[in-house]
Image (cartoon, rainbow, N blue to C red):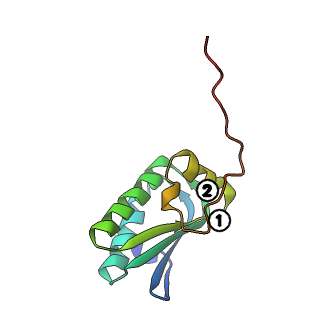
Amino acid sequence: MHPQDTPTSQRCHVTMIRLAGELDYTNSRDITDAVSVVLAAGAVSIVVDVDQVDFMGAAALGALVRARHICRRQGALLTVRCTRQRLRHLFTITGLDSLLEPGTQGPSPYPARRAAPTR
């Protein structure tokens, strides 16, 4: 994935960046690069769609956080569109569910696990 190859579209003043496949340390920089490219083109509201992502590692999650900070510094808004329950759960357990687009949040389908009591 290279920023120039990342599918984007614009509708109603919202720029959509669609990510797919495996996102890990080898390509996580491409996420922030793609956001920077659309910001340079004048985007003010960016939605990163991760519904076609098969695997998302910690580096990719970190890249999304960095991308949000980049957007905030430039007065833009970044949200993540994620309707797949497994990925939503990943955002929830890492405390990054605030990145999720309104309407795609909602409760995790996985029950919360409690640590066993220590004696």
Residues tagged 2 and 1 counted as in contact (Cβ below 8 A)? yes
The structure residue drawn at horizontal position 32% and vertical position 67%, both measured from the top left corner, is 72
Q: Amino acid at mark 1?
A: Thr
**Farthest residue, direction left:** 73
Q: Secondary structure at mark 2?
A: helix
The structure residue drawn at horizontal position 53% and vertical position 55%, both measured from the top left corner, is 97
Q: Secondary structure at mark 1?
A: loop
Q: Which residue is more in the foreground, 23 or 63?
A: 63
Q: Quadrant of residue 31?
A: bottom left
Q: Which residue is mark 2?
A: 88
Q: Quadrant of residue 39?
A: bottom left
The structure residue drawn at horizontal position 35% and vertical position 74%, both measured from the top left corner, is 76
Q: Which residue is more in the foreground, 105 or 90?
A: 105
Q: Which residue is more in the foreground, 7 or 109?
A: 109
- Side of 51 relative to 29 (left or right): right
Q: Which residue is mark 1?
A: 83
Whichever of callouts 2 and 1 sits on the residue coming sooner in the sequence is 1
Image coordinates for residue 55, horizontal then vertical, percent: 59, 54
Q: Amino acid at mark 2?
A: Arg
Neighbour tally class for label 1: few under 14, some 14-19, many 20 plus, Cα within 10 Å: some
